[in-house]
Amino acid sequence: MNKKRWRNYALWVSIVSQVLLLLQLLGHLTGLFDLTEVMKNDILAVTDVLLGLLAT
């Protein structure tokens, strides 16, 4: 396997975001945590800002 691939910043951003999405889904499905509507809106706002920064 090409070792340069593992040094790619975009690869690690993708992996981390997919792992976080998986954890969120598993937490919701198992009922380990439940977010209130206010918490969801706050998290969505922070996520939008982070994705905007990553896009630039």
Image (cartoon, grey):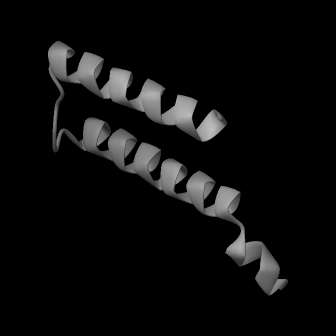
- Residue at screen point 59% across, 40% down: 54
Judge by depth and name the residue closer to the eye, 33 or 51. Answer: 51
Pick the front one: 13 or 15:
13
Is residue 18 shown above or below 3?
A: above
Q: Is residue 55 above or below residue 27?
A: above
Residue drawn 24% across the image and 43% down it: 30
Q: Where is residue 23 in the image (x, y as percent from the top left)?
A: 36, 50
Quadrant hosting residue 21: top left
Name the spot of residue 31 as percent of width and height, x first: 18, 38
What percent of the width, then of the height, locates residue 16?
50, 57
- Going 78% across and 74% down the picture, which residue do you hit? 5
Q: Position of residue 25 (x, y in %)?
A: 38, 40
Counting labels gives: 0
The answer to whether residue 40 is above or below residue 24 is above
List the single residue furthest toward the right.
2
Q: Locate residue 24: give its quadrant.
A: top left
Position of the C terminus, as image quadrant, is top right
Quarter holding the N terminus?
bottom right
In this image, 15 relative to 10: left or right?
Answer: left
Q: Which residue is drawn at 16% across and 39% down?
A: 33
